[in-house]
Image: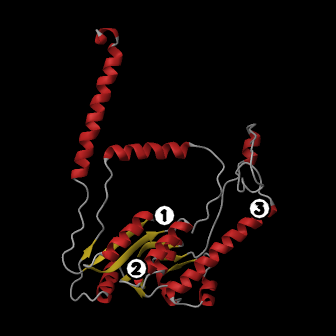
Amino acid sequence: MFSRRHPYLLFLMVMAALATIGIAILSLVVASVSGKKAAYNGDMVGVIEIVGAIVDSTPIIEQIKAFREEESIKAIVLRIDSPGGGVGPSQEIYREIRKTSSVKKVITSMGAVAASGGYYVAAACDGIVANPGTITGSIGVIMGYTNMEDLMQKIGLSAVVVKSGKYKDIGSPVRSMSPEEKSLLEELTQSIHRQFVGDIAAGRRMETAQVEPLADGRIFTGEAAKEMGLVDRLGNFQDAVQWAGELGGIEGDVETVYPEEERLPLFRYLMESVLQLWHQSQVGVRLPQARM
């Protein structure tokens, strides 16, 4: 009776059920073929990759902590190929590396780019290996946004803002920034810049006065960075692994191991992707993000 009265509804219910079953089966398949698990056989060097913009520090910190606590891992190599990223995440990774250095040695291997926040992270390590042509440096802080005030006026739109404090909409893209607001943000970036310089000086065992002239945002090749004391050695990834192995007391050929890849169940992955897209679609006034 139901199928005769509501044929289309029945069809949709059947399709939804089939889709749910299909997703569940596919999720099990993905989980069963997820990445190779880390195997600890003898003394090894752990390799952690930092690729792309540094946005979320949590996975990297967890990997560093896991390798620090694993007895078979005698040293760690950070393979950095990043142009930088958020201030907070870079500082969190820096701190975790410094904590780890007191337990076992950490060496950075720079890829094509290890600049700004990427260099911030590298500076925490016990040694840095770069290619001669690696792009590094860019020691500085930047904060910016796009002002759309003139565009909105041309198309006849006006912004309505209700705020609890005079600075609550600082950096709004729909109005000009006042001199007072600009001064406030400049003080903020300078404060973060001082932290950047201080941490590099501490990590590299240099005087602050040595770092300051190099911290004007310019980029360097790996070769130039070595001459300035920002890099220890020129070489490739294998050179960094060999150095880390020596510092870790490993004799002969050095074996490497990578962190176990965590694969989310497909259903959870799809749900998180949908939620992320929804959040990205929300329009609002946001404070410009300081980044490295």
For mark 2, does the 10 Å Cα neighbourhood hold few (<14), some (14 to 19), or many (20 or more) residues?
many
What residue do we see at 59% from left, 81% from top? Answer: 197
Q: Amino acid at mark 1?
A: Ala
Given this view, does label 1 or label 3 mark the residue nearer the observer? 3
Residue 134 appears in view:
yes
Is 175 drawn above or below residue 72 in the view shown? above
Residue 14: where, in percent of width, then height? 29, 24
Q: Is residue 91 left or right of residue 232?
A: right
Instruction: Choose the circle earlier in sequence order: 2 or 1.
Output: 1
Is 18 drawn above or below residue 73 in the view shown? above
Which residue is outermost to the right?
A: 179
The residue tagged 2 is: 100
Gap in Å between the C-alphas at discs 2 and 1? 23 Å
The residue tagged 3 is: 181
Q: Amino acid at mark 2?
A: Thr
What residue do we see at 77% from left, 54% from top? Answer: 176
Q: Amino acid at mark 3?
A: Glu
Instruction: Choose the circle earlier in sequence order: 1 or 3.
Output: 1
Which residue is outermost to the left?
A: 41
Residue at disc 1, secondary structure: loop
Circles 3 and 2 in contact, beta carbons < 8 Å: no
Instruction: Choose the circle earlier in sequence order: 3 or 2.
Output: 2
Given this view, does label 3 or label 2 mark the residue nearer the observer? 2
What residue do we see at 32% from left, 28% from top? Answer: 16
For mark 3, does the 10 Å Cα neighbourhood hold few (<14), some (14 to 19), or many (20 or more) residues?
some
Gap in Å between the C-alphas at discs 3 and 2? 40 Å
Q: Within the image, what quadrant is residue 140 found in?
A: bottom right
5 and 118: which one is in front? Answer: 5
Gap in Å between the C-alphas at discs 1 and 3? 28 Å
The residue tagged 1 is: 53
